[in-house]
Amino acid sequence: MQEIGLACPKAAVARSFEQALEVQAQVGYPTIIRPSFTLGGSGGGIAYNREEFEEIARRGLELSPVHEVLVEESVLGWKEFEMEVVRDKADNCIIVCSIENLDPMGVHTGDSITVAPAQTLTDKEYQRLRDASIAVLRKIGVDTGGSNVQFGINAEDGRMVVIEMNPRVSRSSALASKATGFPIAKVAAKLAVGYTLDELRNEITGGKTPASFEPSIDYVVTKIPRFAFEKFPAADARLTTQMKSVGEVMAIGAACTNRCKKRCAGWRSARTDWIRPSLICHYPTIRRA
């Protein structure tokens, strides 16, 4: 990332607990521990002291199939954004959708309430993320197909860091496809066999335009995760970097409160009177308020 002028949180890979301690001494507390090659952040967590760090680091090393963890500086509380990018063999790149997490950094994306497209970015900030995400794909070497690039932004000083990149169709890709109508997986499959974006037709416009046209929507989509802690009474309901949701609901509308209530109505036994947008970002629990 440094070679293309992008910053990442201070971090290093550790393959033993002793190495993890050395890295932690450099990044300080709180510390983010992320095991390699696990899904949904399994085995990871946030350590605020030596005791928590030892527990999470040892667990992460054990659960990682390659026995390694990434020990990372904390960016808790930062704003989190995602960009869904598609690239073809001719280096044509489009942003299918931008996604904003209402929950701040520290809550797994799969557990976060999200809106698409992003609502609090200025055009300048959006273009900055757009350019950065495309540069990431080129540097990583994703020649064709879809990718998800995630960013953290410090609201106080504007510092931006790349926090994650998934060089594949992901959970967020499914949300972006449903939100925009752009069939990311289908397009990615055709790009893999040699097509270019301008050779494919855009299904959103009924084939009147090529797939190289970036989707533009006049509504906002909200995703709320579904939890099942009632079935696991011993589980910790606090939301962290480990994904704990078992599903999600999605709604389309113009007003945030209405969309949230629509989606809560999709839960079989949900209450809709607890949605308070002004509090939604400050309480990382399943109720948020």
Image (cartoon, rainbow, N blue to C red):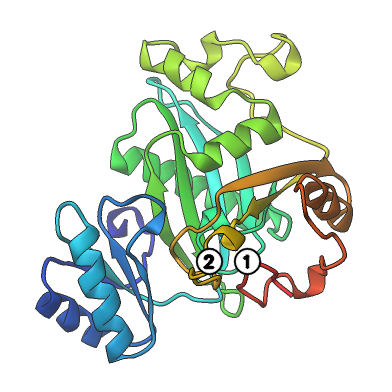
Q: Quadrant of the C terminus?
A: bottom right
Q: Which residue is mark 1?
A: 103
Q: Is residue 230 above or below residue 48?
A: above
In the rendered structure, are the residues bearing label 1 and label 2 in contact, judged by CB atoms less than 8 Å apart? yes
Judge by depth and name the residue closer to the eye, 101 or 225.
225
In this rendering, would 16 be left or right of 33? Answer: left
Q: Amino acid at mark 1?
A: Asp
Residue under label 2, please give it.
Answer: 107
How much space separates mark 1 and mark 2, taking CA atoms?
7 Å
Q: Is residue 84 left or right of residue 168?
A: right
Image side of residue 252 versus residue 145, left or right: right
Can you give x and y, in whole percent of width and height, for residue 148 in the image?
A: 47, 43
* 164 up-or-down from 175: above or below: below
Percent x, y of residue 57: 24, 74
Residue toward you, 155 or 262: 262
Callout 2 secondary element: loop
Query: Compared to 82, does 275 lie above or below?
Result: below
Horizontal and vertical percent position of residue 218? 83, 38
Bin the neighbour count of mark 2 within 10 Å (Cα to Cα): few under 14, some 14-19, many 20 and up.
Answer: many
- The kind of residue tagged 2 is Val
Horizontal and vertical percent position of residue 174: 57, 34
Residue under the image location 82 percent in, 68 percent down: 274
Whether residue 286 is visible: yes
| Residue drawn at point x = 65 percent, y = 15 percent | 202
Viewer-proximal residue among 281 and 9: 281
What residue lies at 61% left-to-right and 39% top-to-bottom? 175
Q: Kindly state the secondary structure of the residue where label 1 is placed.
A: loop
Q: Quadrant of residue 205?
A: top right
